[in-house]
Amino acid sequence: MGVQTQRSSQDGHDQRGPGEQSPDGEAPVTEKRARAVAEAARETRWDRPSFARGLYLGHLDLGLIHPFPTGDPRADEEGAEFLARLRVLCEQLDGQLIEREARIPDEYLRRLAELGMFGMKIPREYGGLGLSLTVYGRALTLVGSVHPSLGALLSAHQSIGVPEPVKVFGTEKQKQRFLPRCARGAVTAFLLTEPDVGSDPARLGTIATPTGDGDYLIDGVKLWTTNGVIADLVVVMARVPPHTDATGEHPGGISAFVVETDVPGLTVEHRNAFMGLRGIENGVTRFHRVRVSAADRLGAEGQGLKIALTTLNTGRLSIPAICTAGAKWSLKIAREWSGARVQWGHPVGEHQAVAGKVAFIAATTFGMEATCELSARLADAGSRDIRIEAALAKLWCSEMAYRIADELVQIRGGRGYETAASLAARGERAVPAEQLLRNTRINRIFEGSTEIMHLLIAREAVDAHLSAAGDLANVDADLAAKARAAVGASGFYASWLPRLVVGDGTLPTGFREFGPLARHLRYVERSSRRLARQTFYAMGRWQAGLEKKQVFLGRIVDIGAELFVTAAACTWANQLERTRPDRGPGAVRLADAFAAQSRMRVERFFDELWQHTDDGDARLAARVLAGDVTWLEEGIIDASEGTGPWIADASDHPSRTENLLRHVD
């Protein structure tokens, strides 16, 4: 692809600690500044209704998702025809070939491009197929069932690579220049992460220096660049320093640029290898005085992080689609194996211990499919704000898909731990269960780790509380400001809290059109109001300190996620019951089982909101990081010693440990 390749070197990696000067001479990267950068990139307006946001505020507005949203019949028919062609192709692709060779054959990429897979979401006027997000998700589920590396390549290209940000933020010239190439099969990538910068973009070290003649010179290193090893085009996030030109002073900021990978100074230094996704083309990319025209900048200077976050709002939906592929395959294997494997005179699936696992896999797979379908349909309709829905879908599906894969390995026993190649070599069916477990693990990290997703969703979920509280939730506000804020907040809560007392969930006739599923929706309604009350109590107790209670906020988010998926499962089952008589009864049984299992998880989360070991765990962690119990590590050999430098060493920043100890003691 014209990209230089060489062995990776560690020089030039930005290893600044908190409060250190950024390389462009800007102010130190403090916690306050990091928060400010993240807040500035957030979309703060809610111009369209959001079903999931309502759940966190104690309001179940079922009319936003019921009747289950449907698409244009003609578009659905075209999508079905495309998926039929894709299925024929996928049946001819060998996922185990990708696994053995640790790469996707060029022939596979060519055939996918000929089918239009690289332009599924690109509008037809720019050479794409113009398919809906619903069809796009189903396509990723199908191709991901061949090998998830294929799904990763296609989603990284279309969900966060060049096509999506150019389609949404690009000028007409940029669309005409880049989108047809992407649709024809030019591979693209998204470059944000750096060796020392993950989810804290305020510390971004890649710099785009204005040259004064309308160009920029980009310098920096990008890590984990999915598709970057073979990409023709990349979107790179770089910090533009404050500068002055003939038009005046410019504050600069994180900006997005489309860069051709064959330009001088752009080097792929390493192709990374991982525990799973053996076909993924993921590497380290270095920029050394790479010249980029201002015409290739997306949006204005300083708009890069907003572009990235906006792209991810719908881009995250690709992860649940790929997770659903693994879940559906797990269900198939679990059903076949549990029915055929006999122990103690009965198929293992008839033993209650295994039957519970099979039921969990089946019910959870139905919940995942319902979540994917609902989120994609809402996105296609365009009348709903789905930023929370998409984030919840990514968070919940990635967590549950890994649990499903783990249960499949357990059901298969020793054969679950044995590789497919080894099984085949001794004459057994080559079931790659352990491969699924390895491949599925990354989805809890991709496009926002579970921990980061908890914080992002929590910030959106408690936004109404923070807005009402004002300076009560501002750690930097003085007492006088907090007192004034308390007066304003009391007005909001005086009108809001009474609405959390009763609702349809307390009425035995509530949601009766759902038949046997009505009781689950009544539970969702009651639990939504209970969740909002608990959040209010936490806000009153901790005020500005609430943002430090990350584990508490994580449980709040997880409760909302379970309620969202239960509502999705019930409405999806209702839709299938009305439109697919052959599937309706089974769908209702699956939704009923899922909602019952989900209720158990929700009740546990509620219990753990106030009865937990969080404070003790924090104190112990501080002592561990301070080196108080290193004796516990004796008696082993650390095979990683001397293999390479750490990105950061706690001993390099003793103030970090001191601050942590002061905080928890």
Image (cartoon, rainbow, N blue to C red):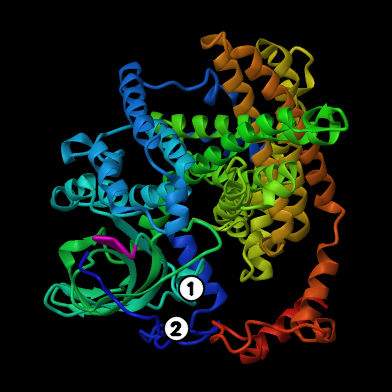
Which of these two is toward me, 315 or 466?
315
Q: Quadrant of the C terminus?
A: bottom right
Q: Which residue is mark 2?
A: 14
Q: Is residue 380 left or right of residue 498?
A: left
Q: Is residue 45 visible?
A: no
Query: What residue does disc 1 label?
Result: 197
249 or 661, which lies in front? 661
Considering only vertical position in the picture, is 437 above or below 235? above
Q: Is residue 234 magenta?
A: yes
Relative side of 381 to 145, left or right: left
Seen from the viewer's position, the closer of residues 273 and 173 is 273
Which secondary structure class fits the magenta region best? loop
Number of numbered markers: 2
**Separation of disc 1 and disc 2 at Cα?**
8 Å
Please indicate, yes or no, whether residue 426 appears anywhere in the rendered image. yes
Q: Mark 1 near mark 2, Cβ–Cβ under 8 Å?
A: yes
Q: State whether residue 257 is above or below residue 518.
A: below
Relative to residue 366, is residue 403 depicted above or below? below
Q: Residue at x 68, y 38 (%)?
A: 562
| Range drawn in magenta | 228-235
Q: Is residue 367 above or below residue 649?
A: above
Tell me which corner region of the image, top left, top right, bottom left or bottom right, holds residue 472.
bottom right
Residue 459 percent across, percent down from the top left: 59, 54
